[in-house]
Amino acid sequence: MDKRSEANRQTRERIARALLRLLGIKEFSDISVTDIVREAHVARASYYRNFSSKEDILVNAGRLIMDDFGKAMGEIDGGCLSYEGVVLTFRYFREYRIELLRLHEAGFTSIYERLFQEYVVRTAQGRIPESMLRYGVSFYTGALFNVYVRWLENGMEESPERMASLFYTMMAAAFESVGTSFMEGEKVDKAVGTHRCEPVAEER
């Protein structure tokens, strides 16, 4: 990557992270271009050279969130398809609860659902049958993301561990009903038996 391309990449990242920080304190509709360039410490021309709208920044910000999420998930065997990965998913996205709630209320939830699905598809390639990659991953990630959104709307009263236990139980039962082993390559009956909503310690 040449110096100009790297400088543009860094500028785009600074602008995207600035928007995420602003979402922690303001509604999306109330954030102006001036707010963004001041927060990012970039020239107004740099903003318009890299982005055509605030919505365009959202996609870039979403990719940054997913890149950071992928790094956090790197140590988890099985990624999002494992029970431990589901726990981490709920923990990680809780950190962005204010920003994502504002975006959800503004009608941009689908952007992040699509980016999340793209991430899971990439990480699942070569680990599960192609037929399940085509349809099973869409079912799984759609369910996981929408359970997260409902948890977000309800104020995240349950712990990430509790939510992971509930979700993993429901998913294991769903795949068991069609006789398919999917999550982390485990036998579904084993997955259900291990994570069937057993009591979990609530975080303090």
Image (cartoon, helix red, strand yellow):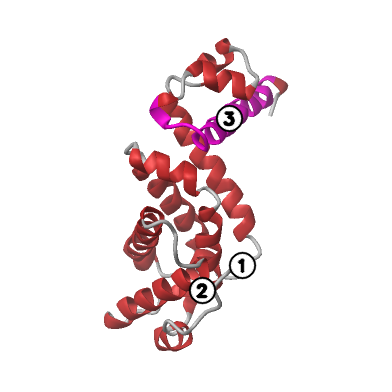
Marked residue nearer the N-terminal end (1 or 2) = 1
Q: CA distance from mark 3 to mark 2?
A: 33 Å
Inspect this view and state whether residue 111 appears: no
| Circle nearer the viewer, 3 or 2 | 3
For the magenta stretch, what is the residue range? 4-29
State the image coordinates of residue 20 (x, y, percent, origin top left).
53, 36
* Above or below, comparing residue 196 to residue 5 in the picture: below
Disc 3 residue type? Ala
State the image coordinates of residue 117 (x, y, percent, origin top left).
41, 53
Which of the numbered marks, if any, corresponds to residue 76? 1
Disc 1 residue type? Ile
Which residue is farthest right? 3
Q: Residue at x 36, y 39 (%)?
A: 108
Residue where numbered disc 3 is placed: 18
Which of the numbered marks, if any, corresponds to residue 173? none
State the image coordinates of residue 125 (x, y, percent, origin top left).
48, 61
Q: Residues within 10 Å of mark 2 (few under 14, many from 20)?
A: many
Q: Answer with the quarter of the image where residue 201 lies.
A: bottom right
Marked residue nearer the N-terminal end (3 or 2) = 3
Marked residue nearer the N-terminal end (3 or 1) = 3
In front here: 115 or 198? 198
Please, what secondary structure does the residue beneath circle 1 have?
loop
Question: Chief secondary structure of the magenta span?
Answer: helix
Q: Is residue 46 left or right of residue 149?
A: right
Which residue is farthest top? 45
Q: CA distance from mark 3 to mark 1?
A: 29 Å
**Rendered-image quadrant of the N terminus:** top right
Q: Is residue 198 left or right of residue 134?
A: right
**Rendered-image quadrant of the C terminus:** bottom right
Residue where numbered disc 2 is placed: 83
Whether 25 is among the magenta residues is: yes
Whether 99 is among the magenta residues is: no
